[in-house]
Image (tube, grey):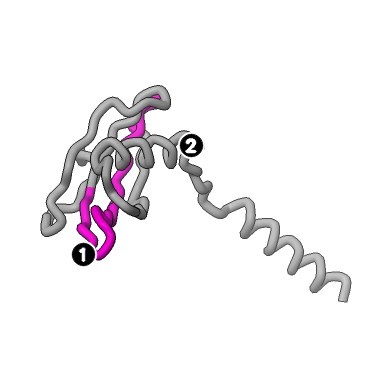
Amino acid sequence: MFTSRWVLASLLLLGILSAPPVLAVPDEVPAIIEGFLAHQFPGSSSHFWVLNAAQWQSIEEMVVDFHAVVMKREGDAPSQHRYLLLIVAGKLAGAQSIPMDATTDCRPEQT
């Protein structure tokens, strides 16, 4: 009985320690996305966004890929948008609109 508990505890610990690390998005990224959308659609009645990916380029640079659904006015059909944002040192440094029907997937260059 003692041996089976020890083996189970060892396997559990091994599983936890060998799990890949999860990188969290810095706290300022949601505020940067919200500010970007407020600037892009100043008169919108509502919006929401979904983070597709966030990738560190260097210790201070991050590229964020996200979808946004914007309701410009009450009663209008919502519009969908996709953007890549370049965030450098916690500030928005660049933005690129990606067509919704784009067949390419945004990934880092393979060298």
Mark 2 Cα shell of 10 Å, populated few (<14), some (14-19), many (≥20): few
Look at the image and give the residue range highlighted in magenta: 57-82
Q: Position of residue 107 (x, y in %)?
A: 23, 46
The residue under the point 51% across, 37% down is: 27
For discs 2 and 1, the disc positioned in front in the rendered view: 1
**Type of residue at label 1?**
Ala
Quarter the N terminus occupies: bottom right
- Residue that numbered label 2 is attached to: 26
Is residue 50 left or right of 43 when viewed as pictured?
right
The percent coordinates of residue 35 (x first, y second) are 36, 36
| Quadrant containing the C terminus in the rendered view | top left
Q: Report whether residue 40 is seen.
A: yes
Residue 59 visible in the shown view: no
57 above or below 97?
above
- The answer to whether residue 31 is magenta is no
**Amino acid bearing label 2:** Pro
Q: Secondary structure at mark 2?
A: loop
